[in-house]
Image (tube, coloured by chain):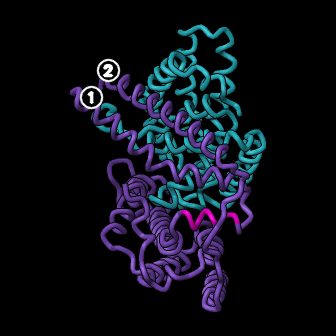
Amino acid sequence: MHLEPFAEGKSFIHSLDPRIKIIGLLPFITFVAVSDKIKVSLLSLILGICLMFLSKLNFKILISRLYIVNIFILFLWVVLPFTFPGEKVFSVGSLTASKEGFIYVFNITLKTNAIILSTIALIGTIPVFKITHALRHLKIPKKLVMLFFFCYRYLTVLHRDYNVLYNAMKVRAFKPKNSLQTYKGYAYLISMLIMKSYEHSQRMYNAMLCRGFNGKFPILNKFKAKRIDYIFLFLMFFITLLLNYA
Amino acid sequence: MHISEGILSAPVIITGISLTVVGVGIGLKKMDYDKIPEVAVLTSAFFVASLIHIPIGPSSAHLILNGLMGILLGFSVFPAILVGLTLQAILFQFGGFTGLGVNTFNMAFPAVVSFGLFRFLTGSNHHYMLMFSGFLCGIVGILGSALLVALSLVSTGDVFFPVAKLIVIAHIPVMIIEGLITGTAVSFLNKVKPEMLAAGGG
């Protein structure tokens, strides 16, 4: 499975220092997430779209990602306008949709998409191993970063194990149905996966002991923030601050 | 069972972050360095397992298995779920970063409760008792998470009450199936790798 479809690329955003991108993004999305002004959400969506174009993302994959997220939002569109008290727009049976409700959901839609676009543009464009490295620079506890690193490293391995197990089930004419047998089948599949993961981890731990692992990962490519990185960071902070007064 | 970004209010987000920081802190403190590979690779296994969609009635749902995670990992389930959700946010944009605190707590806290419950019930180590405890823990994991998700939404605004109710109701069938799967998995692991069930809490 290809996990990082946005990480490869040669855009301006791709070339920025990963640390700068993470530090620049977090205050911005936090601010957008908690704001309840339509104007702020609209402006941040515009910024998100700009970032998206700047990072030259693969459009097809991007759309499929946005689609998944917006399905949940669609669910809110169906429910929330009817539960929000306010000026009546129309009514279905005993339910009345309110104007305030529609504005509220519209705002959520804008915010969610703004955050997702800017997150894909800034974080999605960093290879995960570089994120791991950046997290250490950002003073995230060492144990947590190691956990993150090993977990990511073994995702593809276990996904392969899963495929092998599932193919074996299919070869034996397994068809998912609403039956106890199906659930039992999945339970054994998951148990096998857990067992395999346990065995992988024991082998990995022994291999690390053999090689004298002392908790340090030697790094060949060190991060170096250039002037353009600082300008970008300044701009991100400046825009976040400006949104405060919008 | 994620709440996506841009929905929760600031107080809820801040509460979620603080509770998660405490939970992860305890989890990391209890987890020795030589346990890290095991917890990490188990987390990847659960990540892969959560991609499985199983049929439920006319529709399907993906597995969460936080009850089983709790049984196997103990308090380490907090950092494990944080890592899993962060990876989901980075790789698939599910959940996202601003909801990370709330979402981690909503899934990890019921998992820790399951862990305690499992320990409490399986003192005698009788096989059927193990299976039944697993079943119960699977239910507690999902029920707890659904209730916490509902609570987070309702504390954001009363308008979410119907949505919250729908979410809890929709998770009742999921609960039962997760219970069945957790019970069966616990009984399987007890036969094949009993040391895994004993190792939890590292």
**Which image quarter: residue A16?**
bottom right
Chain B: colour as depicted: cyan
User: Quick check: do tags 1 and 2 share a chain?
Assistant: yes
- Whether residue A103 appears in this view of the structure is no
Whether residue A77 appears in magenta in the rendering, the answer is no
Q: Which mark is residue A151?
A: none
Judging from the image, mark 1 belongs to the subunit labelled A
**Residue that badge 1 annotates:** A177
Q: Which stretch did the figure color magenta?
A: A129-136
Is residue B192 positioned above or below A167 on the image?
above
**Which image quarter: residue A234?**
bottom right
Left or right relative to A24: residue A195: left
Is residue A188 positioned above or below A139 on the image?
above
Q: Amino acid at mark 2?
A: Gln
Left or right relative to B90: residue B73: right
Whether residue A131 appears in magenta in the rendering, the answer is yes
Q: Look at the image and tell me in which quarter the C terminus of chain A lies.
A: bottom right
- Whether residue A163 appears in this view of the structure is yes
The chain assigned the colour purple in the figure is A
Residue depicted at 64% across the width and 67% down the height? A219
**Residue that badge 2 annotates:** A181
Residue depicted at 50% across the width and 57% down the height? A84
Residue depicted at 44% across the width and 65% down the height? A102
Residue A91 picture location, percent across and down: 35, 56
Residue B157 picture location, percent across and down: 59, 54
Judging from the image, mark 2 belongs to the subunit labelled A
Question: Which is nearer the eye, B188 or A211?
Answer: A211
Judged from the image, the secondary structure of the residue bearing numbered disc 1 is loop
Left or right relative to B17: residue A193: left
